[in-house]
Amino acid sequence: MADAVEDALPRAVALSWGVAERPQRGPKRELSIERIIETAIQIADDEGLGAVSMSKIATTLGFTTMSLYRYVTSKDDVLLLMQDAVCAIPIPAEEEDGDWRSGLRLWAGATIDVMRAHPWFADIPISGMPLMPNNLAVLDWGLRIMKDLPLSDPEKMSTALTLSSYARANGVVERDVQRSRAQPDEPRRSGEAFSAALSELVTEERFPYLAPLVSSGVYADSEGDDDQDDYAWGLERILDGIQRYVDARGAGEPIVAAMPRPEPVPHDKAVREAAKARREAEGRLREARKREREAISKARERQAKAEERAAKG
């Protein structure tokens, strides 16, 4: 049975579950899968995922590159095991669970915490459904929080995917902004000078809905001076939506079926040209409306002056 399980799983997955055959331990300083993965994680933490290579790991450990292949078959194995290793987070005991919203709030935040500790985490591509034990333990925690919700199993999985995807996307943005700020030669894309320059380019005629945000300084507020935590705000709105759906389920209300995905716009030259012509026409229309407003304003000023002269005369 164990052999059948091992044969059905990729090498890294079988290793993570402890069902793959491991080399016999040698002398005290002999290699181990654990030491290989710990070293790879440290390299990635210090230098980024791009610095992780079989030769770099081997050199750091003081062994030859070929010696690593007794334990892992490829760098891909190492990356998967690294990803699973950092997901070995402390999961609260079930008796500590509160209401489902606070539980899912904590659950989604775990993704952010992992990415803050290991910024390279999201650089490892998602190749399919979670198969590694630590990843599955985290998923199991999320499903435990939702156990009493009137949701079907697919709906619970979709809820978990929605929250984890949202947290992951925000974690990537937060990480990339921090990396940009850490670059000594990178000009800061914030401050009064930047806002002033941007306001000259983002005009109401070309960007009628964005321009007010630029003028107010909200758009360029990379320091978060508006006191709004964008991640927390968005998470609460997602939880609001789930709350509404759960309440409707519990009350037996008819559920609106999920709408099909919009048909993508063809990547066609004629379509691009037509879209460009539309944008240009909209820009001309906005300019014409601006001139109309200015003409009306001036006409009213002239009328007011004429009435004032008539009253005096």
Image (tube, rainbow, N blue to C red):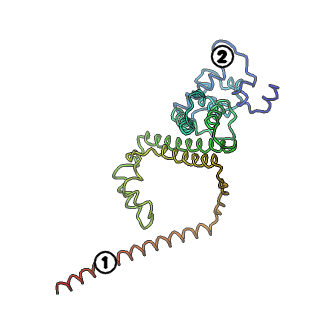
Q: Residue at x 37, y 46 (%)?
A: 225
Residue 42: image x %, image y %? 55, 27
Residue 77: image x %, image y %? 68, 32
44 or 236: nearer the eye? 236
Check the image and report above or below for 258 versus 303.
Answer: above
**Residue 30 marker:** 2
Residue receiving disc 1: 298
- The single residue placed furthest to the top in the displayed view is 27
Q: Amino acid at mark 1?
A: Lys
Check the image and report above or below for 11 versus 178.
Answer: above
Q: Residue at x 43, y 41 (%)?
A: 181
**CB of mark 2 within 8 Å of CB of mark 1?**
no
Q: Quadrant of the C terminus?
A: bottom left
- The single residue placed furthest to the front in the displayed view is 251
Task: For mark 1, give the secondary structure.
Answer: helix
2 or 1: tag closer to the N-terminus: 2
